[in-house]
Amino acid sequence: QKEVEQNSGPLSVPEGAIASLNCTYSDRGSQSFFWYRQYSGKSPELIMFIYSNGDKEDGRFTAQLNKASQYVSLLIRDSQPSDSATYLCAVNIPHSGAGSYQLTFGKGTKLSVIP
Amino acid sequence: DGGITQSPKYLFRKEGQNVTLSCEQNLNHDAMYWYRQDPGQGLRLIYYSQIVNDFQKGDIAEGYSVSREKKESFPLTVTSAQKNPTAFYLCASSIVPGNTEAFFGQGTRLTVV
């Protein structure tokens, strides 16, 4: 079964610290990887996407991808209470049919940033 | 403003009734998706469509049906065959299917009474 795995948390960090969120995926054919943030009762919003091995930085957020280890992570520097939310990892996994991909989500990690 | 519009925001349905959730996008995106989210759970894919007049089943398609007659619209029908339909339903779209990011509508919360 093609899966995306995340620690459910909750992950608690003090304000100003670095929050580290991790995700593993099962299908080596996956080519694109996304991090979404979801506040309670709201729809997910895209934070970052990454396609190539290595790091990608955007403001306080850094996405890291290691395709050999089938691992993708999100670092949040200088964490703020407003970062408290559930973070969803999503992976485009090859589906039946040529060129067909299924955007598959992990169950999410709940992050709490303590003032 | 470009975006994805889901309606209604809240929906109540009696057991045994079919109900249709609306999803419209004006982003000119080719791909559209329907997900279901239960409390404390991630998103599970119901159906997705990569092009008009074509759609594929996701992981939990039983009890649901869709159509894609127009590029802008991807309605989801929750049929009476769906055993536990109470959930938060999310529609998303992406420019092309596959390796581009998906954007979500605000969701429809369906409750069976």
Image (cartoon, coloured by chain):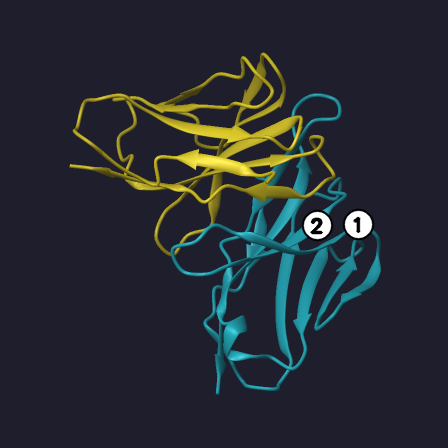
In the foreground, A48 or A52? A48
**Which hue is chain A drawn in?**
cyan
The percent position of residue A8, horizontal first and vertical second, equals 48, 64
Note whether residue B91 is visible: yes
Label placed on residue A33: 2
Disc marking residue A51:
1
Q: Position of residue B59 (x, y in %)?
A: 49, 32
Q: Quadrant of the N terminus of chain B?
A: top right
Q: Is residue A77 left or right of residue B49?
A: right
Residue A29 circle label: none
- Label 1 amino acid? Tyr
Under circle 1, the secondary element is loop
The residue drawn where x is 21% and y is 22% is B17
Q: Do the residues bearing badges 2 and 1 touch, measured as CB atoms within 8 Å?
A: yes
Whether residue A62 sits left or right of residue A45 in the image: it is: right
| Residue B91 x %, y % | 49, 36
Indicate whether B96 appears above or below A26: above
The answer to whether B97 is drawn above or below residue A82 in the figure is: above
> Mark 2 or 1 closer to N-term?
2
Identify the residue at horizontal 42%, vertical 42% (top origin).
Answer: B107
Residue under the point 18% across and 22% down:
B16
Callout 1: 10 Å neighbours few (<14), some, many (20+)? some
The quadrant holding residue A79 is bottom right
> Percent from the top left, x then y, of residue A84?
49, 72
Q: Secondary structure at mark 2?
A: strand
Chain B is shown in which shade?
Answer: yellow
Give the residue drawn at x 67%, y 41%.
A92
